[in-house]
Image (cartoon, rainbow, N blue to C red):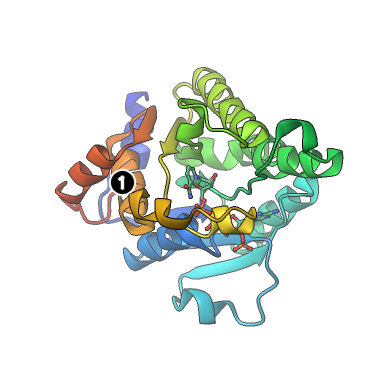
């Protein structure tokens, strides 16, 4: 990051930031939205659910929720950009592209329409949104964070297309980091297995293995720590999550 960029995005600890978090209705994304709002930042949270009263879920006046179903990437992106404009946001300090889904099964049995949906939700949407957010991020010398998975590192049976989408994000981030050098920062963070509802939603019962998975709260804290450290590419291991617990809080800094 250039001097100008680091001055704009990190030099004013007390400033209220604008933060976008996708997939914020459950698991890690929900915890991230609550954490950034809890530190006084203005959060735009997105998800696929139509919520009658989003305050039932978020209980924070500085979180605005909009429904943006990533399975229609173009429509979801324009809904997000419109919401940012309606909120008067001309710049974006931090975007965490966290929303994703999984399909679990034998690769040769994966239905074509399900495969398309997985690619749309986990990959095409992220590319479209990165492009659409660029001017807002450049204005703030802000930061784009994508959430990948350690599945890209350690092959995991029955998650082939999911793994491919996350590996694609890794390559995307590497390229964007070069393209946007001096204008906005780009990070990719790969969490390890985490005890959220993601597996159950994909029809997988993880059974007793869940006790070996990390707690979503620990993973969400470790993600924030990796963002504060400005790690270009970070794998969230148990050790890293443990270290994050003892890092200084540094109030107000993203
Ligand atoms: N859990 C793990 O073991 C693990 C490991 C490595 C990486 N990750 C990654 O961590 C991130 C968060 O996952 P998680 O474990 O917190 O899962 P989660 O609890 O299922 O949360 C995923 C979020 O994405 C949303 N979402 C799913 N499909 C969507 C769509 N079509 N449009 C918009 N939003 C959609 C979900 O909405 P609903 O609330 O409606 O379901 C939810 O808010 C994902 O990128 C995941 O790939 C997870």
Q: Residue at x 47, y 21 (%)?
A: 181
Residue 186, image x and y in percent?
Answer: 47, 31
Q: Residue placed farthest to the front in the image?
A: 208
Mark 1 Cβ inside 8 Å of ligand 1: no
Q: Residue at x 63, y 49 (%)?
A: 101
Residue 157, image x and y in percent?
Answer: 57, 33
Label 1 secondary element: helix
> Can you identify the residue that label 1 sits on?
222
Q: Is residue 25 visible?
A: yes
Left or right of 130 in this view: 75: right
Residue 231, image x and y in percent?
Answer: 33, 30
Q: Is residue 89 visible?
A: no
Q: How many other residues sit within 10 Å of disc 1, few (<14), some (14-19) or many (≥20)? A: many
Res 201 quadrant in image:
bottom right
Left or right of 196 in this view: 51: right
Nearer to me, 62 or 189: 189
Q: Residue at x 64, y 53 (%)?
A: 202
Rendered-image quadrant of the N terminus: top left
Q: Residue at x 41, y 61 (%)?
A: 31
Nearer to me, 208 or 68: 208
Left or right of 129 in this view: 243: left
Nearer to me, 52 or 117: 117
């Amino acid at each position: 990051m250039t001097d100008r960029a680091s001055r704009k995005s990190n030099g004013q600890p007390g400033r209220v930031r604008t933060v976008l978090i996708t997939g914020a209705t459950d698991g890690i994304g929900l915890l991230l939205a609550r954490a950034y709002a809890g530190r006084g930042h203005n959060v735009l949270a997105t998800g696929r659910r139509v919520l009658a009263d989003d305050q039932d879920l978020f209980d924070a006046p500085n979180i605005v929720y909009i429904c943006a179903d990533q399975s229609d990437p173009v429509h979801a992106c324009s809904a997000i950009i419109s919401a940012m404009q309606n909120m008067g946001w001309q710049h974006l300090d931090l975007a965490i592209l966290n929303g994703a889904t999984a399909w679990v099964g034998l690769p040769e049995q994966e239905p074509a329409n399900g495969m398309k949906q997985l690619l749309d939700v986990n990959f095409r949407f992220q590319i479209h949104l990165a492009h659409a957010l660029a001017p807002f991020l450049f204005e703030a010398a802000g930061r784009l964070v994508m959430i990948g998975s350690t599945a890209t590192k350690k092959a995991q049976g029955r998650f082939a297309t999911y793994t491919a989408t996350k590996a694609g994000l890794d390559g995307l981030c590497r390229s964007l980091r070069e393209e946007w050098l001096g204008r906005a920062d780009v990070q990719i963070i790969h969490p390890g297995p985490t005890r959220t509802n993601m597996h159950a939603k994909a029809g997988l019962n993880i059974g007793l293995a869940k006790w070996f998975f990390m707690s979503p709260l620990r993973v969400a804290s470790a993600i924030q720590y990796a963002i504060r450290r400005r790690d270009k590419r970070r794998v969230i291991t148990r050790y890293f999550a443990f270290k994050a617990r003892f890092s200084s809080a540094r109030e107000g800094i993203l």
